[in-house]
Amino acid sequence: MAKEKKAPRPRAQTPKGFRDYFGTEVTERAHMLHTIAGVYHRYGFEALESSAVETVEALGKFLPDVDRPNEGVFAWEDDDDGWVALRYDLTAPLARVYAQHRNDLPTPYRRYAMGPVWRNEKPGPGRFRQFYQCDADTVGAPSVAADAEICAMLSDTLEEVGIPRGDYLVRVNNRKVLNGVLETMGLSDDAQQQAVLRTIDKFDKVGESGVRELLGKGRLDASGAYIDGVGLSDDQAAPVLAFLTSKGADAAATLANLRAAIGGSAIGAEGVDELEQIATLLDAGGYGSSRIEIDPSVVRGLGYYTGPVFEAELTFEILDEKGRKRQFGSVSGGGRYDDLVKRFTGQSVPATGVSIGVDRLLAALRAKGRIGGTAQGPVVVTVMDKDRMADYQSMVAELRNNGIRAEVYLGNPKNFGNQLKYADKRESPVAVIEGGDEKARGVVQIKDLILGAKLAQSASLEEWKERPSQYEVTRDQLVAKVREILSQWA
């Protein structure tokens, strides 16, 4: 009888586009989420936690990556609900929640939500298929005062998490203005309109001349490849270029330039009026152009925005993987989406909101050295006699009950050196030692591991004597001595 072939062992690796997060990273994210939630809560928003899985019909098709399987989402067929998918953002689920529970919710409904989202996109450096978002939305408020409030809250949030004024800018535009420009151009073909929108979105990268070429016949990119253009005439392209270059020295100048760019378009004029109202409200709240400004170059990628759109950009420079200076870029975006709930109810429901990319914001703070480094580990109570485990558990319980993070070493206690190596790997600040002799005398040894490491690097014999890194105290002084050492390194 042939011997049964064993199945190969699974490969221990994360799928492409995903990653694992360890101690400090998880702690920093949790702290940031708590901080952001505090700002949202202060503004009167309530928490909501919705399902990570939605029906494909409820999610809709709004992602631009239509060439990926399932048009950019992770989807599968369910016996009861047909095709379902992991949520790709937190806004589409909100539309479903509001439509489902609208009779029980206040109007306007102000909610915030935080959690992972998934996109079946092509992964790349710093681009993952699972990432955290942190959203706040107002549903049922038609006034652009709701949009202005979201922008103000976004500004406050960035400052609260550690991005000072001068290092960020919230930029505001309006899709109605853009629609007015398209109307002035006389474009009726939807595919051509989408091509124009994609070209406008490249303005920051290729500039006015690049956009002019891409709206026309095309251009050579930096690699030498030729990119086909939209095929517009110079006259057709003129309103787009006027729109993109309409930013003036202040909001009033920008608005005047936008009115010229939209010509006689009624929808465009409505959009400019809304931007003017937003600028007035923000100015009244003390949010000047150094924090929030009107910027016609902002074009959000998702297809459901209907009015004001906004984006938060970090303006400081960082070094890329090749050591070149570049601006960090966008960490947040949002806008008004008055037709999203209508998909479920048949009735238009005004809504506006913002989403913060938590992982990008954390990366920005690390790049500036405002978070990061190594988190302090727990106090380690070493085990000198495995038969006295109850004594060690009593010590660690006493430390924990006094608010000190601590653990008993639970590996093989035979080699004491390995216990100290473990404490070093955990970045532990203190080790507690009680052998048989210490137990008999009613004392414990407290080893300051941080000071010990510093002295080991550079200290002379005299310094060792002057600054001992290990102390003997009575058992009842355990907590006090540990707390004293920890306070030196806080």
Image (cartoon, helix red, strand yellow):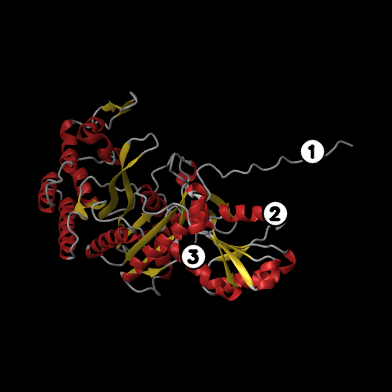
> x, y (%) of residue 36?
37, 63
Q: Is residue 414 left or right of residue 325?
A: right
Residue 173 showing in the rendered view = yes
Q: Which residue is mark 1?
A: 5
Q: Nearer the viewer, residue 6 or 480?
A: 480
Confirm or deny contact between disc 3 and disc 2 (CB under 8 A).
no
Q: CA distance from mark 2 to mark 1?
A: 41 Å
Secondary structure type for disc 3? helix
Q: Quadrant of residue 98?
A: bottom left
Q: Disc 3 residue type?
A: Ile
Q: Residue furthest front?
A: 462
Secondary structure type for disc 1? loop
> x, y (%) of residue 454?
48, 52
Secondary structure type for disc 2? loop
Q: Which residue is mark 3?
A: 485
Q: Of callouts 2 and 1, which one flags the residue occurring earlier in the amino acid sequence?
A: 1
Q: Disc 1 residue type?
A: Lys
405, above or below 252, in the image: below
Residue 115 showing in the rendered view = no
Q: Disc 2 residue type?
A: Asn
Q: Of callouts 3 and 2, which one flags the residue occurring earlier in the amino acid sequence?
A: 2
Q: Nearer the viewer, residue 463 or 245?
A: 463
Q: CA distance from mark 3 to mark 2?
A: 26 Å
Give the residue at x 70% y 58%: 413
Give the residue at x 54% y 55%: 82
> x, y (%) of residue 107?
32, 72
Mark 1: few, some, or many residues within 10 Å (few <14, many ≥20)?
few
Q: Quadrant of residue 393?
A: bottom right
Mark 2: few, some, or many residues within 10 Å (few <14, many ≥20)?
few
